[in-house]
Image: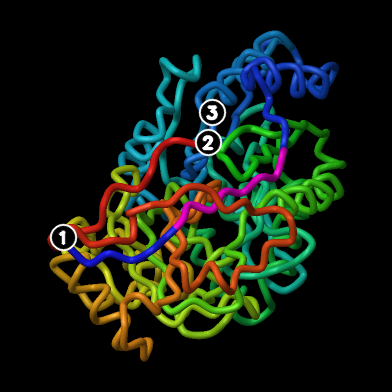
Amino acid sequence: MDVIEARVVRDTLVAPAIADPQHAAHDALAHVLRGRIARGARVAITAGSRGIANVPKLLRGLAQAVRDAGGEPFFVAAMGSHGGGTGAGQRDMLAGLGVTEATVGAPIVSEMEVVEVGTTPSGVSVYCDANAVRADAIVVAGRIKPHTDFSGAIESGMLKMTSIGLGKAIGAAAYHAAFQQYGYEKIIREVCAVQFARVPIVAGVGFVEDHRGNTHAVEAFPVEEIVSNEERLLVKARELLSVLPFDELDLLVVDEMGKDLSGAGMDTNVTARAVDGRSQKSPTPVIRQLFVRDLTEHSHGNANGVGLADFCLRRLADKIDWHATYLNALTAAQPASARLPVVCATDREAVHHALVAAGVERFADARIARIKNTLHIDAMIVSAAALATMRNGGRYAVAEDSDALSLRADHFAPFPTEN
């Protein structure tokens, strides 16, 4: 057994969670919808591909709010090209997240047909889910958080759901091509301006999560107030985002990656690696080597973002659906994100190769951190060498000893589950 001294480090930030997310979603939207839809109106609500905390409850609350306002709710799969770019695949993704007609209390429509609704000032054609366009009203709902590919006043949230989500595979491909020429934020804002003017969007609902994976805020807005409030909520989401409090690590071990966790599989706001896997998205932390161990079941084989890692386990590589992965990477105009890292049979093999590549001679001297995934980091396992360089700032508490970086036979001990 190779033993390395390590401690659990916990994020101590206090952020109150909403006790009843379904009720909160209902009340927020009900207030906004009052007087905005006619009795009997068919109202489309967006359902995306991310693993949002309490998502079945949140969506069920939105559906009930529509009913209470006199409308007839239904959900549209709004996730660009995810799910292999098919209606059945997107329905399966929703089911994997616990979003079914039974759990959300309304029909789910998952088809890939779109309608071209206009053109942006930059000359980009704007597309919208055909079933949503034909509805009497649309409610766009999404989690607001920092984006993996760019930084701006708006990133991931209601606007991204309005543009890429409702644009389906055709729209997502068109917009990502335009991003390369004009930039992400400019095109997203332009596309949404066309959508807001040409399709019956009446409201937006934004969800914000804390660093522990709890629902922290649920707010709804009339369409004319979506942009300003998304900008405001993004500031709050950034404050809640967990980060790795190090300037440099020799090795970051990520237990699982997946599309349900991040659009890039592993959140670049945490790893600081840009989506090409080689350049820095932000100055710190500089991660010399990154080892990812598994792919979530809810990714349905889509391993887009695996190219951000240097090493992965064979069990991850064997789960990859290359069609879904390539489709996602090419739609996003980021082929590097689908590159396969060095595939290793065991944790021991991956750690050995990673530390050699990082220029570390002794395992005990390695600055290593291990996290479950990049979505919520309320706890991380940190080696003694890394702990000595940690930037605390009062937010992180060093807790109990851990053997989760030691190698028993050929594999790590399980990640601690208690908080």
Q: Which residue is denoted by mark 3 in the rendering?
A: 54
| Majority secondary structure in the magenta region | strand
Q: Is residue 51 left or right of residue 239?
A: left
Q: Earlier in the sequence, mark 3 or mark 2?
A: 2
Asked if residue 328 lies in the magenta stretch, the reply is no
Q: Which residue is denoted by mark 1 in the rendering?
A: 318
Q: Secondary structure at mark 3?
A: loop
Q: Position of residue 270 (x, y in %)?
A: 56, 63
**Residue type marked 2:** Ala
Q: Which residue is denoted by mark 2 in the rendering?
A: 47
Q: Position of residue 342 (x, y in %)?
A: 23, 78
Asked if residue 11 lies in the magenta stretch, the reply is yes
Q: Is residue 266 above or below residue 121?
A: above
Q: Earlier in the sequence, mark 3 or mark 1?
A: 3
The reply to whether residue 222 is visible in this rendering is: yes
Q: Residue at x 74, y 61 (%)?
A: 393
| Tag shown at residue 65 | none
Toward the bottom, the furthest residue is 359
Q: Residue at x 64, y 70 (%)?
A: 150
Image: magenta residue range: 7-14
* Structural crowding at the residue carrying mark 3, measured as other residues with C-alpha within 10 Å and reported as few (<14), some (14–19) or many (≥20): some
Q: Is residue 196 left or right of residue 214?
A: right
